[in-house]
Image (spheres, rainbow, N blue to C red):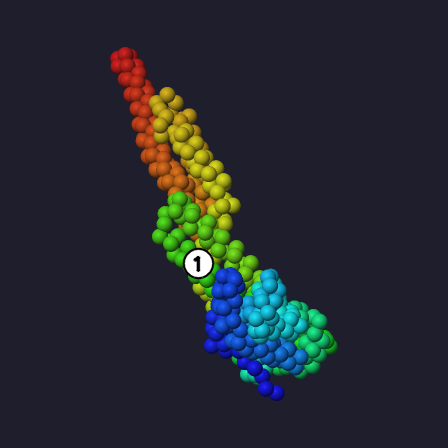
């Protein structure tokens, strides 16, 4: 079959003819008729060529080549068909003038053919939700077929085309025949993707399998394998997240070691570390659950294991051992924080009633009794504070440590004063006893010398 092709050169020539005709009709009168007479032969030739071009489009359309029919001629073909059509407002007057002058009448554009071509053009400009036209999808389909492209991509294109061009049964027939072949291919493609550890390809297969209706339905084995693809992706993502969180915990711990316990910057690091620890624990639980789910998909699990990502915990737990111990101490401190405050207050209260600041001159014995009781209370308080500090492995807050140091000093002061009071007390007793002894001796002497 011989097809007519309207080229760029033809379109340029038609545009020149159309402009000349428009000028002639707008001038009117004898001058306009003279101008029009000069364009009658090229005008008639152009219309004959356009009608032949429309016939070519028609033949292509009804041989199942609609996309080619629209793209066969150079851009602007249908526009020129409209501009060169003699049937226009006021043409009856000019038609009569041409007949009176015995001049040839230009033929009409074949509106039957033009209507069919226009309808097909409109059909091919229908857009889907993604903004793609039917023409674009058919073009992609032709490219896929010519290049022996992926059947999955071809099937998706056909379904898109079927949605936009539902009146054509050919698309349904093509989908049914390709679906049967593609159904068998998907499982094999999935296995190949897993062997290559290409989880991105597996996700695309999953989208293809679950995103459309299959007739007959895909086998359960294929569906289960593809559904596991999202779990595989999550495992890889969580593996990276676990590693990042472990690094964050180590950094928080190392910086915390350089800060003063209990300082504002130290507390910020502790808060950040606790947040990262919570995220790590939540991510670890998800990771373990996903690995357990993949036990039913040994092919995927094997692919993950080959890359050392099925059990990252031994390595990560070595990294975060000290950070977790550090945070455990912070947890313990938070539980004991009020207890520390209470013990610190009791130390301060005990120091405020220290016998070291009291006078022992009025009643030394009474003072000594109180001082000994105070020392017992101080030793008991010191022991309780020390036991409390031991629970934090020498990471006790500065307040309690300062209070214990002051209490220790007070204990020494009281002990020293006790020794001083005891010395004074002994000296006083010795003085009293010595004085009494001296008086008794004088009394005896008086009695002896008085009898003489």
Q: Is residue 319 visible?
A: yes
In front of the other: 172 or 188 = 172
In front of the other: 231 or 160 = 160
Q: Which residue is mark 1?
A: 248
Left or right, residue 389 beside residue 278: left
In the displayed image of the protein, which residue is found farthest to the bottom? 1
Q: Is residue 8 visible?
A: no
Left or right, residue 293 beside residue 257: right
In front of the other: 190 or 54 = 54
Q: In which quadrant is the N terminus drawn?
A: bottom right
Left or right, residue 79 beside residue 270: right
Task: Identify which residue is drawn at 28% across, 17% down.
Answer: 442
The answer to which image quadrant residue 357 occupies is top left
Task: Identify which residue is drawn at 44% across, 58% down.
Answer: 248
Q: Residue 30 location in percent, x, y?
A: 51, 64
In front of the other: 236 or 90 = 90
Q: Residue 16 location in percent, x, y?
A: 47, 70
In the displayed image of the protein, which residue is found farthest to the right? 216
Q: Is residue 444 above or below residue 99?
A: above
Q: Secondary structure at mark 1?
A: helix
Q: Residue 334 location in percent, x, y?
A: 49, 46
Left or right, residue 243 beside residue 215: left
Task: Identify which residue is drawn at 42% across, 59% down.
Answer: 250
Task: Identify which residue is drawn at 36% across, 47% down.
Answer: 260
Instruction: Estimate how packed mark 1 is, as few (under 14), some (14 to 19) or many (20 or more) residues with alpha carbons within 10 Å.
Output: some
Q: Residue 145 location in percent, x, y?
A: 59, 82
Report how many numbered discs are placed on residues in the image.
1
Q: In which quadrant is the C terminus drawn?
A: top left
């Amino acid at each position: 079959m011989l097809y007519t092709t309207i080229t760029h050169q033809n379109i340029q020539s038609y545009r020149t003819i159309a402009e000349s005709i428009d000028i002639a009709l707008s001038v009117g009168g004898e001058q306009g008729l003279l101008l029009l007479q000069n364009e009658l032969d090229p005008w008639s030739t152009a219309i004959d060529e356009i009608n032949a071009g429309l016939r070519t489009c028609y033949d292509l359309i009804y041989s199942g080549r609609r996309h080619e029919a629209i793209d066969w001629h150079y851009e602007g073909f249908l526009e020129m068909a409209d501009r060169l059509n003699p049937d226009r407002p006021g043409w009856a007057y000019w038609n009569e003038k041409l007949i009176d002058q015995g001049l040839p009448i230009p033929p009409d554009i074949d509106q039957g053919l033009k209507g069919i071509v226009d309808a097909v053009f409109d059909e091919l400009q229908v857009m889907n939700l993604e903004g793609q036209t039917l023409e674009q999808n058919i073009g992609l389909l032709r490219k896929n077929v010519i290049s022996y492209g992926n059947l999955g991509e071809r099937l998706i294109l056909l379904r898109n085309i079927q949605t936009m061009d539902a009146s054509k049964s050919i698309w349904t027939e093509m989908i049914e025949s390709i679906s049967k072949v593609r159904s068998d291919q998907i499982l094999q493609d999935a296995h190949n993707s897993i062997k290559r550890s290409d989880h991105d390809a597996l996700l695309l297969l999953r989208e293809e399998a679950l995103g459309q209706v299959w007739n007959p339905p895909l086998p359960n084995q294929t569906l289960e394998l593809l559904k596991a693809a999202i779990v595989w992706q999550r495992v890889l993502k969580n593996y990276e997240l676990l590693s990042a969180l472990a690094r964050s915990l180590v950094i928080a711990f190392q910086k915390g070691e350089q800060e003063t316990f209990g300082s504002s910057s130290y507390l910020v690091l502790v808060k950040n570390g606790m947040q990262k620890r919570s995220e790590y624990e939540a991510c670890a639980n998800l990771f373990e659950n996903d690995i357990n789910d993949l036990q039913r998909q040994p092919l995927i699990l094997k692919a993950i294991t080959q890359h050392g990502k099925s059990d990252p915990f031994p390595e990560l737990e070595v990294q975060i051992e000290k950070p977790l111990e550090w945070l455990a101490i912070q947890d313990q401190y938070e539980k004991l924080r009020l207890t520390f405050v209470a013990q610190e207050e009791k130390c301060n209260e005990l120091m405020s009633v220290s016998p070291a600041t009291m006078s022992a001159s009025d009643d030394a014995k009474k003072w000594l009794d109180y001082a000994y009781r105070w020392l017992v209370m101080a030793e008991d308080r010191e022991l309780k504070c020390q036991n409390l500090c031991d629970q934090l492995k020498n990471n006790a807050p500065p307040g309690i440590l300062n209070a214990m140091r002051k209490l220790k000093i007070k204990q020494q002061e009281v002990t020293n004063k006790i020794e001083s009071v005891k010395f004074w007390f002994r000296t006083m007793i010795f003085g009293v006893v010595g004085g009494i002894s001296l008086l008794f001796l004088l009394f005896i002497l008086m009695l002896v010398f008085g009898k003489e």
